[in-house]
Image (cartoon, rainbow, N blue to C red):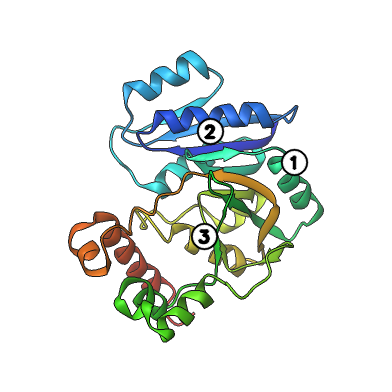
Amino acid sequence: MTNILSIIITHYQTPVLLKLCLKSIQENIGQLDHEIIVADSQSKKETNDLLKEEFPQVKLISFLKNVGYAKLVNEGIKIAQGDYLFIINHDIIILKDAIPKMLDYMEKNSQVGIIGPQLLTFSNQSQISCFRFPTISTIIARRTFLGKLNWGKKKIEQFSMQEEDFSLPKPVDWVQGSAMFVRKEAVEQVGLWDERFFLYLEDTDWCRRFWQNGYQVIYLPTARVSHYYGQASKRNGAFLDILFNKYTRLHIISFIKYLWKWKGK
Protein backbone atom coordinates (compact mmCIF):
# COMPACT_ATOMS: atom_id res chain seq x y z
CA MET A 1 0.00 0.00 0.00
CA THR A 2 1.29 3.45 -0.92
CA ASN A 3 -0.91 5.53 1.38
CA ILE A 4 -1.42 5.39 5.12
CA LEU A 5 -4.95 6.80 4.84
CA SER A 6 -7.75 6.65 2.30
CA ILE A 7 -10.43 9.31 2.83
CA ILE A 8 -13.72 8.20 1.27
CA ILE A 9 -16.31 10.96 0.87
CA THR A 10 -19.89 10.07 -0.01
CA HIS A 11 -21.66 12.80 -1.96
CA TYR A 12 -25.15 13.54 -3.21
CA GLN A 13 -25.78 16.74 -5.16
CA THR A 14 -24.37 19.30 -2.72
CA PRO A 15 -21.13 20.53 -4.31
CA VAL A 16 -20.93 23.64 -2.10
CA LEU A 17 -20.62 21.47 1.01
CA LEU A 18 -18.30 19.05 -0.78
CA LYS A 19 -15.94 21.92 -1.58
CA LEU A 20 -15.86 22.99 2.08
CA CYS A 21 -15.18 19.41 3.11
CA LEU A 22 -12.28 19.03 0.68
CA LYS A 23 -10.77 22.35 1.69
CA SER A 24 -10.88 21.35 5.36
CA ILE A 25 -8.98 18.17 4.51
CA GLN A 26 -6.32 20.13 2.65
CA GLU A 27 -5.90 22.48 5.59
CA ASN A 28 -5.67 19.79 8.28
CA ILE A 29 -4.09 16.69 6.71
CA GLY A 30 -0.51 17.90 7.17
CA GLN A 31 2.21 15.68 5.66
CA LEU A 32 0.29 12.42 6.08
CA ASP A 33 0.40 10.15 3.02
CA HIS A 34 -3.19 9.93 1.85
CA GLU A 35 -5.61 9.67 -1.02
CA ILE A 36 -9.09 11.17 -1.38
CA ILE A 37 -11.93 9.29 -3.05
CA VAL A 38 -15.29 10.91 -3.78
CA ALA A 39 -18.17 8.48 -4.42
CA ASP A 40 -20.86 10.57 -6.12
CA SER A 41 -24.49 9.44 -6.36
CA GLN A 42 -26.72 10.75 -9.19
CA SER A 43 -23.73 12.72 -10.38
CA LYS A 44 -24.08 16.22 -11.86
CA LYS A 45 -21.77 18.18 -14.16
CA GLU A 46 -21.25 20.84 -11.48
CA THR A 47 -19.60 18.30 -9.18
CA ASN A 48 -17.41 16.89 -11.94
CA ASP A 49 -16.27 20.38 -12.93
CA LEU A 50 -15.48 21.28 -9.31
CA LEU A 51 -13.21 18.30 -8.86
CA LYS A 52 -11.45 18.70 -12.21
CA GLU A 53 -10.78 22.40 -11.74
CA GLU A 54 -10.04 22.71 -8.03
CA PHE A 55 -9.24 19.23 -6.72
CA PRO A 56 -7.66 17.28 -9.61
CA GLN A 57 -5.91 14.88 -7.22
CA VAL A 58 -9.26 13.46 -6.04
CA LYS A 59 -10.34 10.09 -7.39
CA LEU A 60 -13.98 10.26 -8.52
CA ILE A 61 -16.45 7.38 -8.66
CA SER A 62 -19.68 8.63 -10.21
CA PHE A 63 -23.08 7.05 -10.67
CA LEU A 64 -25.87 8.32 -12.90
CA LYS A 65 -28.53 7.04 -10.49
CA ASN A 66 -29.02 7.37 -6.75
CA VAL A 67 -27.46 4.06 -5.72
CA GLY A 68 -27.76 4.36 -1.95
CA TYR A 69 -25.29 5.11 0.81
CA ALA A 70 -23.91 1.60 1.30
CA LYS A 71 -23.09 1.24 -2.41
CA LEU A 72 -21.13 4.51 -2.37
CA VAL A 73 -19.07 3.45 0.63
CA ASN A 74 -18.39 0.00 -0.80
CA GLU A 75 -17.17 1.28 -4.14
CA GLY A 76 -14.82 3.64 -2.32
CA ILE A 77 -13.47 0.84 -0.14
CA LYS A 78 -12.87 -1.38 -3.17
CA ILE A 79 -10.34 1.02 -4.70
CA ALA A 80 -8.86 2.37 -1.45
CA GLN A 81 -5.13 1.79 -1.06
CA GLY A 82 -4.68 2.94 2.55
CA ASP A 83 -3.99 0.96 5.71
CA TYR A 84 -6.79 3.00 7.28
CA LEU A 85 -10.04 4.39 5.91
CA PHE A 86 -11.76 7.60 6.95
CA ILE A 87 -15.34 7.35 5.68
CA ILE A 88 -17.19 10.67 5.83
CA ASN A 89 -20.23 12.42 4.43
CA HIS A 90 -19.72 15.46 2.23
CA ASP A 91 -21.21 17.62 5.03
CA ILE A 92 -18.28 16.93 7.38
CA ILE A 93 -15.65 19.61 8.07
CA ILE A 94 -12.34 18.28 9.38
CA LEU A 95 -10.96 20.17 12.37
CA LYS A 96 -7.36 20.49 13.51
CA ASP A 97 -5.67 17.31 14.82
CA ALA A 98 -8.77 15.14 14.37
CA ILE A 99 -7.13 12.79 11.88
CA PRO A 100 -3.77 12.45 13.74
CA LYS A 101 -5.61 11.69 17.01
CA MET A 102 -7.69 8.92 15.44
CA LEU A 103 -4.69 7.47 13.63
CA ASP A 104 -2.59 7.50 16.79
CA TYR A 105 -5.34 5.82 18.83
CA MET A 106 -5.86 3.17 16.17
CA GLU A 107 -2.15 2.38 15.91
CA LYS A 108 -1.84 2.01 19.69
CA ASN A 109 -4.92 -0.22 20.05
CA SER A 110 -4.84 -3.17 17.67
CA GLN A 111 -8.22 -4.50 18.84
CA VAL A 112 -10.03 -1.37 17.67
CA GLY A 113 -11.72 -1.64 14.27
CA ILE A 114 -13.79 1.56 14.11
CA ILE A 115 -13.42 4.97 15.72
CA GLY A 116 -16.17 7.58 15.74
CA PRO A 117 -15.02 11.16 16.40
CA GLN A 118 -17.07 13.70 18.30
CA LEU A 119 -19.45 15.48 15.93
CA LEU A 120 -20.03 19.19 16.47
CA THR A 121 -22.64 21.50 15.02
CA PHE A 122 -21.37 24.63 13.28
CA SER A 123 -22.29 26.48 16.49
CA ASN A 124 -19.89 24.14 18.33
CA GLN A 125 -22.53 22.07 20.14
CA SER A 126 -21.87 18.36 20.52
CA GLN A 127 -24.14 16.01 18.54
CA ILE A 128 -25.18 12.61 19.78
CA SER A 129 -23.37 10.22 17.45
CA CYS A 130 -22.91 6.93 19.34
CA PHE A 131 -25.66 4.60 20.46
CA ARG A 132 -26.76 1.25 21.81
CA PHE A 133 -28.12 -1.24 19.31
CA PRO A 134 -31.78 -0.45 18.54
CA THR A 135 -34.74 -2.60 19.51
CA ILE A 136 -38.41 -2.60 18.58
CA SER A 137 -39.14 -0.41 21.59
CA THR A 138 -36.53 2.07 20.34
CA ILE A 139 -38.31 2.77 17.07
CA ILE A 140 -41.72 2.87 18.76
CA ALA A 141 -40.42 5.51 21.14
CA ARG A 142 -38.73 7.50 18.38
CA ARG A 143 -41.51 7.31 15.81
CA THR A 144 -44.73 7.63 17.81
CA PHE A 145 -46.29 9.86 20.46
CA LEU A 146 -45.13 7.34 23.08
CA GLY A 147 -41.71 8.97 22.87
CA LYS A 148 -43.17 11.93 24.78
CA LEU A 149 -44.22 9.74 27.69
CA ASN A 150 -41.88 8.72 30.52
CA TRP A 151 -41.55 5.19 29.10
CA GLY A 152 -40.59 6.50 25.67
CA LYS A 153 -38.22 9.12 27.04
CA LYS A 154 -36.36 6.44 29.01
CA LYS A 155 -36.07 4.22 25.93
CA ILE A 156 -34.66 7.10 23.86
CA GLU A 157 -32.23 8.05 26.63
CA GLN A 158 -31.02 4.45 26.87
CA PHE A 159 -30.62 4.21 23.10
CA SER A 160 -28.59 7.44 22.92
CA MET A 161 -26.58 6.56 26.05
CA GLN A 162 -27.43 9.87 27.70
CA GLU A 163 -26.48 8.59 31.15
CA GLU A 164 -22.87 7.92 30.08
CA ASP A 165 -19.82 10.12 30.59
CA PHE A 166 -18.30 10.80 27.18
CA SER A 167 -15.35 12.91 28.26
CA LEU A 168 -13.00 9.94 27.67
CA PRO A 169 -12.74 7.29 24.91
CA LYS A 170 -15.43 4.66 25.35
CA PRO A 171 -16.48 1.38 23.68
CA VAL A 172 -19.97 1.80 22.21
CA ASP A 173 -22.33 -0.44 20.25
CA TRP A 174 -22.22 1.70 17.13
CA VAL A 175 -21.23 5.09 15.82
CA GLN A 176 -22.89 7.23 13.19
CA GLY A 177 -21.70 6.48 9.66
CA SER A 178 -21.27 10.16 8.81
CA ALA A 179 -17.69 9.91 10.16
CA MET A 180 -15.93 6.59 10.74
CA PHE A 181 -12.19 5.94 11.01
CA VAL A 182 -11.67 2.28 10.11
CA ARG A 183 -8.90 -0.30 10.11
CA LYS A 184 -8.65 -1.69 6.55
CA GLU A 185 -7.34 -5.03 7.77
CA ALA A 186 -10.51 -5.46 9.82
CA VAL A 187 -12.70 -4.70 6.80
CA GLU A 188 -11.03 -7.56 4.95
CA GLN A 189 -12.28 -9.87 7.71
CA VAL A 190 -15.68 -8.29 8.41
CA GLY A 191 -16.67 -7.53 4.82
CA LEU A 192 -18.25 -4.56 3.06
CA TRP A 193 -21.44 -2.69 3.94
CA ASP A 194 -24.68 -4.60 3.41
CA GLU A 195 -26.24 -3.01 0.31
CA ARG A 196 -29.68 -4.33 1.21
CA PHE A 197 -29.82 -1.20 3.38
CA PHE A 198 -30.38 1.62 0.88
CA LEU A 199 -30.26 4.33 3.54
CA TYR A 200 -30.10 4.10 7.36
CA LEU A 201 -29.01 1.24 9.64
CA GLU A 202 -26.15 0.19 7.34
CA ASP A 203 -23.70 1.77 9.79
CA THR A 204 -25.41 0.06 12.74
CA ASP A 205 -25.22 -3.29 10.98
CA TRP A 206 -21.53 -2.81 10.09
CA CYS A 207 -20.54 -1.92 13.65
CA ARG A 208 -22.41 -4.96 14.92
CA ARG A 209 -20.46 -7.15 12.52
CA PHE A 210 -17.19 -5.63 13.74
CA TRP A 211 -18.06 -6.57 17.32
CA GLN A 212 -19.11 -10.04 16.09
CA ASN A 213 -15.63 -10.47 14.58
CA GLY A 214 -13.76 -9.41 17.72
CA TYR A 215 -13.10 -5.74 16.89
CA GLN A 216 -14.05 -2.86 19.17
CA VAL A 217 -16.02 0.23 18.16
CA ILE A 218 -14.75 3.28 20.04
CA TYR A 219 -16.11 6.80 20.51
CA LEU A 220 -13.14 9.21 20.67
CA PRO A 221 -14.24 12.64 21.99
CA THR A 222 -10.80 14.23 21.65
CA ALA A 223 -11.04 13.94 17.84
CA ARG A 224 -13.58 16.50 16.65
CA VAL A 225 -15.20 17.27 13.30
CA SER A 226 -18.04 19.60 12.37
CA HIS A 227 -21.19 18.15 10.85
CA TYR A 228 -23.87 20.02 8.92
CA TYR A 229 -26.65 17.75 10.12
CA GLY A 230 -30.29 18.03 9.14
CA GLN A 231 -32.37 15.00 10.25
CA ALA A 232 -34.11 14.46 6.94
CA SER A 233 -36.30 11.70 8.37
CA LYS A 234 -37.84 13.96 11.07
CA ARG A 235 -39.71 16.98 9.76
CA ASN A 236 -43.48 17.01 10.20
CA GLY A 237 -44.26 14.69 13.10
CA ALA A 238 -44.60 10.93 13.51
CA PHE A 239 -47.65 10.00 11.44
CA LEU A 240 -47.29 12.77 8.84
CA ASP A 241 -43.69 11.73 8.30
CA ILE A 242 -44.70 8.11 7.72
CA LEU A 243 -47.24 9.23 5.14
CA PHE A 244 -45.34 11.98 3.35
CA ASN A 245 -41.62 11.85 4.19
CA LYS A 246 -39.74 9.33 2.05
CA TYR A 247 -36.76 9.38 4.44
CA THR A 248 -38.98 8.30 7.32
CA ARG A 249 -40.28 5.42 5.23
CA LEU A 250 -36.73 4.45 4.25
CA HIS A 251 -35.69 4.50 7.90
CA ILE A 252 -38.57 2.23 8.92
CA ILE A 253 -37.92 -0.15 6.02
CA SER A 254 -34.23 -0.36 6.95
CA PHE A 255 -35.14 -0.99 10.59
CA ILE A 256 -37.39 -3.89 9.60
CA LYS A 257 -34.54 -5.34 7.50
CA TYR A 258 -32.17 -4.89 10.43
CA LEU A 259 -34.49 -6.67 12.87
CA TRP A 260 -35.02 -9.52 10.41
CA LYS A 261 -31.28 -9.93 9.82
CA TRP A 262 -30.36 -9.97 13.51
CA LYS A 263 -33.43 -11.75 14.89
CA GLY A 264 -32.51 -13.96 17.85
CA LYS A 265 -28.93 -12.66 17.99
Q: Nearer the viewer, residue 218 or 6?
A: 218
Residue mark closest to the camera, 3 vs 1: 1
Q: For the point 63% across and 48% down, which residue is it? A: 181
**Sequence-first disc among 2 and 1:** 2
Tell me how many marks there are: 3
Quarter-of-image position of residue 131: bottom right
Which tag is nearer the camera, tag 2 or tag 1? 2
Identity of the residue furthest to the front in this view = 123
- The residue lying at 39 percent from left, 24 percent from top is 47
The x and y percentages for residue 158 are: 53, 77
Task: Check disc 1: other Cα within 10 Å, few if <14, some if 14-19, many if 20+.
Answer: some
State how far apart marks 2 and 1 are (Cα).
Answer: 17 Å
- Disc marking residue 16: none
The amino acid on which the numbered mark 1 sits, given as a three-letter code, is: Pro
Instruction: Look at the numbered disc 1 and give the secondary structure of its residue.
Output: helix
Residue at left 42%, top 76%? Answer: 138
Q: Which residue is mark 3?
A: 206
Residue type beneath disc 3: Trp
Which residue corresponds to mark 1?
A: 100
Q: Amino acid at mark 2?
A: Cys
Depth order, front residue of 157/83: 157
**Do the CB atoms of the residues marked 2 and 1 lie less than 8 Å apart?**
no
Residue 175 placed where, x, y %?
Answer: 56, 60
| Residues at circles 3 and 1 in contact by the CB criterion of under 8 Å | no
97 w.r.t. 161: above or below: above
How many residues crowd around disc 2 within 10 Å: few (fewer than 14), some, or many (20 or more)?
many
Of pointers 3 and 2, the one earlier in the residue sequence: 2
Q: Considering the numbered disc 3 on the image, is that residue within a helix, a strand or a loop? A: helix
Q: Is residue 29 toward the left or the right of residue 109 in the image?
A: left
Q: Which mark is residue 21?
A: 2
In the current view of this chain or complex, which residue is farthest to the top?
53
